[in-house]
Image (cartoon, rainbow, N blue to C red):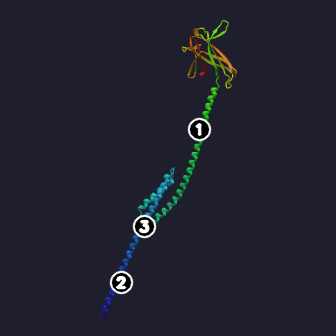
Amino acid sequence: MENSNSSGLALKIALGIVVVLFLGLGFYTSNVIKEKNDQEIELVKEKEQVMADLSNMAKQYDLAISESEVTNEKLIEARGRIEQLMDSLKISQNSVNSLWRYKKKFLALEEEMDVLLAENDRLKVENKLLASTLDSTQVQLAQRTMFTDSLLVQNTELAGVVKNASILQPVNLKGFGVIERSSGKLIPTERAGRSDKLRICFTVAKNQLVASGDKELFVQVIDPFNNVLGVNEQIEFEDTVLNYSLISMFNYENKNLDICEFVTSADGKFEKGTYKVNVFNESELVSTSEFTLK
């Protein structure tokens, strides 16, 4: 009877130990599973954080690249490496070792970004200074060009003024009819029927810009019917043809010179009306006048 009780007690004790061990194993297993789940959740959070940090880094590169006036190959290459790391991280396993490798790569890229962005900022400042210098240089060149153009215009105008001023200028141009006596005496007349010749008189004004020597002016006398009197010959100056009545030749000595010339008609007669007298220095009209015969 005593042995039977002892055996039952031992069985109870053994069963209790088994229950305790089973409960302990279940508690341990539960803790392991919980820790694994917690670790998985933490790894996912850290992975998401690394992904977010990489995305922010990529945005900073995008901003720096968009603000660069010239293409910065270093920034573009670094932006590409971030994109590759993000693609790799998306498909990576959620393990401590794997996440740690990506964190190390992220930290290295972050250091590289600090260097590259600092260099990019320096380049932007230098580019602005260079652009400012170029703008200033362009303004100076534009001002110099304007000044040069102004000088060319002034020189051209001055050359024109000198050229125009270097022409002998006939003044006091007059025309009238004359009666010629057998003695050679000339009597002025306003009557067309009594005029034997037309006398054209003018004064060549003194001009220090004109060198002394033999000179010539072309005189053109036009009757009331628009006919050129005198020799009525032609001379061509480049694209201009001039019909003249006579060539007045004289020796100019840098002082006022009075000149008179005679013009005749083909039939020795002169019509009543207004006559026009023009004096040309080559092709340039330098003096004009009118007179009337009754």
Q: Tell which of 87 and 42 is nearer to you.
A: 42
Classify mark 3: helix, strand or loop.
helix
Q: Amino acid at mark 1?
A: Met
Q: Nearer the viewer, mark 3 or mark 1?
A: 1
Please name the amino acid that badge 3 sits on: Leu
Q: Earlier in the sequence, mark 3 or mark 1?
A: 3
Residue 45 horizontal/vertical position (percent): 42, 66
Label count reads 3
Quadrant housing the N terminus: bottom left
| Circle 3 crowding by C-alpha within 10 Å: few under 14, some 14–19, many from 20 | some
User: Based on the displayed image, in which of its 4 quarters is residue 269 positioned?
Assistant: top right
Q: Which mark is residue 17?
A: 2
Frontmost residue, 279 versus 44: 279
Q: Nearer the viewer, residue 238 or 188?
A: 188
Location of residue 291 by image quarter: top right
Looking at the image, tell me whether mark 1 or mark 2 is earlier in sequence order.
2
Foreground tag (1 vs 2): 1
* Quarter that holds the C terminus: top right
Instruction: Report if the CB atoms under discs 3 and 1 are less than 8 Å apart.
Output: no
Mark pair 3, 2: CA separation = 38 Å
Q: Is residue 163 above or below residue 183?
A: below
Nearer the N terminus, badge 3 or badge 2?
2
Q: Identify the residue under disc 3.
A: 43
Front one among 39 and 138: 138
Place of residue 11 in the rendered image (x, y in percent of width and height, measured from the top left): 32, 86
Disc 1 packing (10 Å; few <14; some 14–19; many ≥20): few
Residue 13, horizontal then vertical, whole percent: 34, 86
Q: Which mark is residue 146?
A: 1
Outermost residue to the top: 182
Tell me the number on the disc at residue 47.
none
Identify the residue at image location x=58%, y=45%: 136
SS category of the residue bearing label 1: helix
